[in-house]
Image: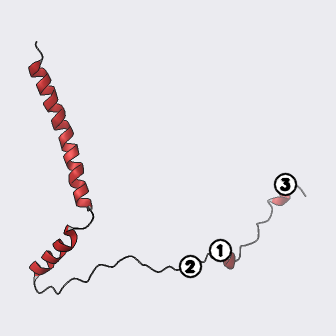
Amino acid sequence: MTNADDYARLPERPRADDLVVEVPAFEDDRPQPEPAPPAAAPELVAATEFARTSHARPTIRRTQVRAGVVIAGVPIVALAVIAVVQILLPR
């Protein structure tokens, strides 16, 4: 048998059962948030959400504020240092 004979016919077609992968299901045990109170009083809903999140872990919003302060603060401090150096150094 030569190399040309090896490529003359296609390989056998795979069975569908060979391609199936079974993944076991798992139970979602993450804590679920409490249901929102009735929307009759929007102020109550907002106050409840604020009270629930006020003692929670820092959120992405707090991280964004921190990043914004750093991004804005570094150039301001750099300009302030340059200004002080230019004022204090004799010409």
Q: Position of residue 51 (x, y in %)?
A: 17, 73
48 on left or right of 35? left
Looking at the picture, which amino acid does disc 1 mark? Leu
Q: Secondary structure at mark 3?
A: helix
Q: Earlier in the sequence, mark 1 or mark 2?
A: 1
- From the image, which quarter does the C terminus lie in? top left
Which residue extends farthest top?
A: 91
Q: CA distance from mark 1 to mark 2?
A: 16 Å
At a point 76% along the width and 71% down the height, the residue shown is 12
Disc 2 marks which residue?
24
Q: Nearer the viewer, mark 3 or mark 1?
A: 1
Q: Nearer the viewer, residue 29 or 43?
A: 29
Q: Residue at x 21, y 74 (%)?
A: 52
Residue tagged 1: 19
CA gap between label 3 and label 1 equals 29 Å
Relative to 10, residue 80 above or below: above
Total labels drawn = 3
Of callouts 3 and 1, the N-terminal one: 3
**Label 1 neighbourhood size at 10 Å, few (<14), some (14-19), many (20+)?**
few
Q: Amino acid at mark 2?
A: Pro
Q: Position of residue 24 (x, y in %)?
A: 56, 79
Colour mapping used in the image: secondary structure
Q: Residue at x 27, y 81 (%)?
A: 34
Residues at circles 3 and 2 in contact by the CB criterion of under 8 Å: no
Please rate how many residues cluster around mark 2, counting C-alpha atoms within 10 Å: few if below 14, some from 14 to 19, many from 20: few
Q: Is residue 62 above or below residue 81?
A: below
- SS of the residue under disc 1: helix
- What residue would you read off at disc 3? 3
Residue 90 locus on image (x, y percent): 10, 13
Disc on the earlier residue, 3 or 2: 3
Q: Quadrant of the N terminus?
A: bottom right
Nearest to viewer (mark 3 / mark 2): 2
